[in-house]
Amino acid sequence: MVAALAAASLPVAVVNPRQVRDFAKAVGHLAKTDALDAQVLAHFAEAIRPASRPLPEAARQALAARLTRRRQMLSMLVAEQQRLGSAALALRPRIEAPITWLRLERDDLDQERRRLVR
């Protein structure tokens, strides 16, 4: 999510989850659901105003390129996985090989994305 927001030039702040949880407890939000978590995060951001740190332009462009490529890779991966389900036994190895490669590429792109965001 951070990568996508940064690549779209939207302000984003990464905060310590423990701080947010402590804030939630302090304001009486003890339950944990996705909807309540979203409300607590919004309240935390409004009250604390954590500093956003935009990525430098070059890093933002590099990140955007990697996110685009990752989306492309995922599309190909899903297509190959769907083909595998109906493929003849003799063709399965020819479909499994690109699936393995696509997963490795996806993982490499994820590592690069994490590095760029840091």
Image (spheres, helix red, strand yellow):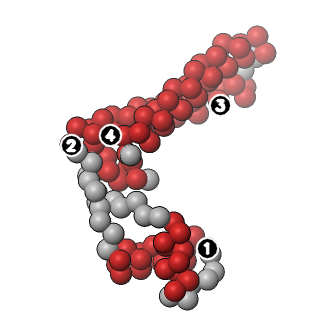
Q: Few, some or many C-alpha atoms within 10 Å of disc 3 (few <14, some 14-19, many ≥20)? A: few
For the residues bearing labels 1 and 2, Cβ distance under 8 angstroms:
no
In the rendered structure, which disc, 1 or 3, sits on the residue that comes first in sequence? 1
Q: Secondary structure at mark 1?
A: loop
Residue 113 falls left or right of residue 87: left
Regarding residue 64, the answer to whether it shows in the image is yes
Identify the residue under disc 4: 64
Identify the residue under disc 1: 33
What amino acid is at disc 3? Answer: Gln
For the residues bearing labels 3 and 4, Cβ distance under 8 angstroms:
no
Identify the residue under disc 2: 57
Residue furthest out toward the top? 90
For the residues bearing labels 1 and 3, Cβ distance under 8 angstroms:
no
For the residues bearing labels 1 and 4, Cβ distance under 8 angstroms:
no
Identify the residue under disc 3: 82
Q: Name the residue nearer the viewer: 71 or 23.
A: 23
Q: Position of residue 31 (x, y in %)?
A: 63, 80
